[in-house]
């Protein structure tokens, strides 16, 4: 349990987490619930997110919710907002955008379809959730926090990931822009820049590639999902009240 009793980071907060069925999103749901939040987990994989939300029951007030959402669909994001409104009579105090995909290939082999798909989920999905939930937060007078998950490869690129790196660089630019636009409404928007974290997404990385990456990481290991979740909890909480437009590296010191 990460929280100190009596000093929870997110007491009474309603939070919406995308990509909640796996990896970082799953760890974020668990950490946020432990920190006193009521969690709405959204994922394209409804079975996975149902399982995550069920696992939270017992450590909560019984109100956590799972929703099926494809973040690249404005109708789906709107319906996730509607479900949240029905259940809690407000859009959410904090939102974390963790839904993301990879479709790696070298530039000349990368299909237009794989380029579009990655941009559509990672960048457009983040845009839609920021827009639809952000607007509802403004409308309801919620002075909340939005946390967008980028990636270390956004900074300097990575072989085989021109689509993914571009999408994550877009997330950084989107976040700093939305931070400027929403600051006057009291809504803070920050990004996390994870390095290499042990999740199903990085399970696909071949061992020989991992063996090349690890020596370049000053802390000499991949990160754990919980180590991203702790930073997300801080950014979602009022304890980061003077942070907006920031991009926080959580990379074990790796600077590609
Ligand atoms: P993950 O384990 O694959 O989890 C991502 C989750 O998002 C999955 O449940 C996935 O469902 C879901 N998802 C995919 N497309 C979606 C859509 N259109 N709408 C809603 N949900 C969707 O990956 P992760 O490692 O936790 O990554 C989480 C975020 O961190 C991503 O944005 C990723 O780019 C970023 N990140 C990860 C690392 C890392 O090392 N792991 C590093 C830097 C940044 P399916 O499984 O059905 O696709």
Image (cartoon, rainbow, N blue to C red):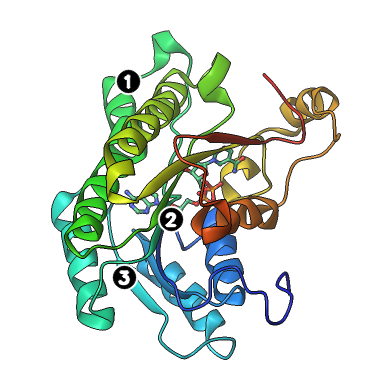
Establish whether ligand 1 lies closer than 8 Å to the Cβ of label 2.
yes
- Residue at the image point whose x is 16% and y is 60% from the top: 139
Circle 1 crowding by C-alpha within 10 Å: few under 14, some 14–19, many from 20: some
| Label located before the other in sequence (3 or 1) | 3
- Look at the picture and state if 244 lies above or below 58: above
Establish whether ligand 1 lies closer than 8 Å to the Cβ of label 1.
no
Alpha carbon distance from label 2 to label 1:
24 Å
- Look at the picture and state if 97 lies above or below 168: below
- Looking at the rendered structure, which numbered label has been put on residue 215? none
- Residue at the image point whose x is 24% and y is 62% from the top: 141
Residue 169 figure quarter = top left
What residue is shown with label 2? 19
* Secondary structure of the residue carrying numbered label 2: loop
- Number of numbered discs: 3
| Label located before the other in sequence (2 or 1) | 2
Quadrant of the rendering where the C terminus is positioned: top right
- Look at the picture and state if 5 lies above or below 16: below
Could you say where residue 63 lies in the image, as x and y percent from the top left?
40, 86
Q: Nearer the viewer, residue 124 or 230?
A: 230
* Secondary structure of the residue carrying numbered label 3: strand
- Residue at the image point whose x is 76% and y is 30% from the top: 253
Between circles 2 and 1, the one closer to the viewer is 2
Between circles 3 and 1, the one closer to the viewer is 3
Could you say where residue 254 lies in the image, as x and y percent from the top left?
73, 26
Circle 2 crowding by C-alpha within 10 Å: few under 14, some 14–19, many from 20: many
What residue is shown with label 1? 111
What residue is shown with label 3? 67
Alpha carbon distance from label 3 to label 1:
31 Å
Alpha carbon distance from label 2 to label 3:
11 Å
Residue 213 figure quarter = top right
Q: Nearer the viewer, residue 44 or 134?
A: 134
**Discs 2, 3 touching: Cβ within 8 Å:** no
């Amino acid at each position: 349990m990460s929280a100190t009793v009596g000093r929870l980071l997110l007491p009474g907060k309603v939070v919406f987490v995308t990509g909640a069925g796996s990896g970082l999103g799953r760890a974020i749901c668990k950490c946020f619930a432990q920190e006193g939040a009521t969690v709405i987990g959204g994922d394209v994989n409804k079975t996975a997110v149902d399982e995550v939300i069920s696992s939270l029951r017992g450590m909560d007030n019984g109100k956590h919710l799972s929703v099926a959402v494809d973040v690249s669909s404005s109708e789906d994001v709107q319906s996730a907002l509607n479900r949240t409104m029905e259940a809690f009579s407000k859009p959410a105090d904090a939102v974390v955008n963790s839904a993301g995909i990879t479709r790696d290939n070298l530039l000349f082999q990368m299909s237009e379809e794989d380029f579009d798909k990655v941009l559509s989920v990672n960048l457009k999905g983040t845009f839609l959730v920021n827009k639809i939930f952000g607007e509802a937060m403004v409308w309801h007078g919620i002075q909340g926090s939005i946390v967008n998950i980028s990636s270390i490869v956004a900074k300097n690129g990575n072989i085989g990931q021109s689509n993914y790196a571009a999408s994550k660089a877009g997330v950084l630019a989107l976040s700093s822009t939305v931070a400027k636009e929403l600051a006057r409404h009291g809504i803070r928007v920050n990004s996390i820049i994870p390095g290499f974290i042990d999740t199903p997404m990085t399970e696909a990385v071949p061992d020989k590639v991992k063996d090349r990456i690890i020596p370049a990481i000053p802390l000499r290991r991949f990160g754990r999902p919980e180590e991203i979740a702790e930073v997300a909890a801080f950014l979602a909480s009022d304890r980061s009240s003077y942070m907006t437009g920031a991009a926080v590296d959580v990379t074990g010191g790796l600077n590609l």
